[in-house]
Structure formats: structure tokens, C-alpha cells
Image (tube, rainbow, N blue to C red):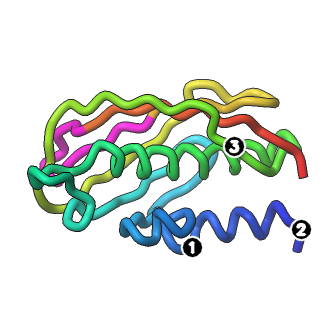
């Protein structure tokens, strides 16, 4: 098995890495065109009981990075390194599960950008984020 294939397997297991695993991230669908994952609100809140904005960024970066790695495989650049993330928090979530859906904005040879829409259990938008990754060869 090459390093790239091993890295992809690691991304999918345990929520996309140690942090995602601790936060309960689960990747449920993944292709270069669409990545879907969930994360519980419980355990990922700020002192007021709302989903922490940083938790939303963790979910967004995890999903966007998985997409970038999958795209990187198609252009012989197996590794993705996040270089920019921004997020707008639209609505608080106090309980349940949030779901993130990442779709590509740009997929080039050296960079990939994904928009991630995070919604609550009722389907209302909680956060919109954008993650840009630099694509690197092995």
C-alpha cells in the first residue's frame, strides 16, 4: 500500500483524525464532489450551551480536507494541507446532531477549495464555511 492510500484510510477512520474522533465526527459519504459528515452538539459546546464555533470549523475542515485529498488523488498530489478557513455562524444549536456537506468551489492541480454547509436536526443552516487546501505530492 502506498502512503497516499494509507493517508486516505486514516482520514476516514475515527472522524478524520484524533481531534475529529474526540469530537464525535463521523464521515458518512465521501467523493471528490461531495463529502458528508455528522457531529454531536453535546460535548462540543461553549459555556452558554451552544455549539462552539470552533467545533463547526473542525467539522468543516475535516470534510473539506477529505474532499481535497480525494481530489488530490486525481492530480497526483496525495496530501492536502489546510491554508485558509473561514466560517459564518448563522444560528446556534443546543442539542442533537449537526450535519456538514462539503462541495467543491475550486479543484485545481495545486489548490482545492470547498464550501461546507452545516445544518441542525431540523435542516436549518447553522454555519457556512470555506476551506482551502494546498495539494502536495508524496
Query: Compared with residue 49, is residue 11 higher up or lower down, i.e. above or below?
Result: below
The N terminus - image quarter = bottom right
Distance Cα–Cα, label 3 vs label 1? 18 Å
Q: Nearer the viewer, residue 54 or 62?
A: 54
Q: Mark 3 points at which residue?
A: 81
Q: Mark 2 points at which residue?
A: 2
138 in magenta: no
Tally of marks: 3
Which callout, 2 or 3, points to the residue nearer the camera?
A: 3
> In which quarter of the view is residue 23 placed?
bottom left
Image point (51%, 52%), residue name: 62
Residue carrying label 1: 13
Where disc 3 sits, the SS reads: strand
Residue 27 visible in rendering: yes
Q: Which of marks 2 and 1 is nearer the N terminus?
A: 2
**Image position, residue 114 (x, y; %):** 54, 34
Q: Nearer the viewer, mark 3 or mark 1?
A: 3
Provide residue 136's location: percent of width, then percent of height: 83, 42
Which residues make up the magenta segment? 116-126
Residue in view at x 22 percent, y 37 percent? 125
Q: Which of marks 3 and 1 is nearer the N terminus?
A: 1
Residue 7's spot in the image, x, y percent? 74, 64
Amino acid at each position: 500500500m502506498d502512503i497516499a492510500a494509507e493517508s486516505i484510510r486514516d482520514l476516514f477512520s475515527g472522524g478524520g483524525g484524533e481531534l475529529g474522533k474526540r469530537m464525535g465526527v463521523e464521515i458518512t459519504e465521501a467523493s471528490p464532489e461531495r463529502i458528508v459528515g455528522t457531529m454531536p452538539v453535546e460535548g462540543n459546546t461553549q459555556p452558554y450551551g451552544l455549539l462552539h464555533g470552533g467545533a463547526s470549523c473542525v467539522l468543516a475542515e475535516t470534510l473539506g480536507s477529505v474532499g481535497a485529498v480525494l481530489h488530490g488523488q486525481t492530480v497526483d498530489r496525495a496530501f492536502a494541507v489546510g491554508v485558509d478557513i473561514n466560517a459564518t455562524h448563522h444560528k446556534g444549536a443546543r442539542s442533537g446532531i449537526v450535519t456538514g456537506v462539503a462541495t467543491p468551489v475550486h479543484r485545481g492541480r495545486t489548490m482545492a477549495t470547498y464550501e461546507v454547509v452545516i445544518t441542525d436536526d431540523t435542516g436549518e443552516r447553522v454555519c457556512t464555511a470555506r476551506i482551502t487546501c494546498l495539494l502536495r505530492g508524496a
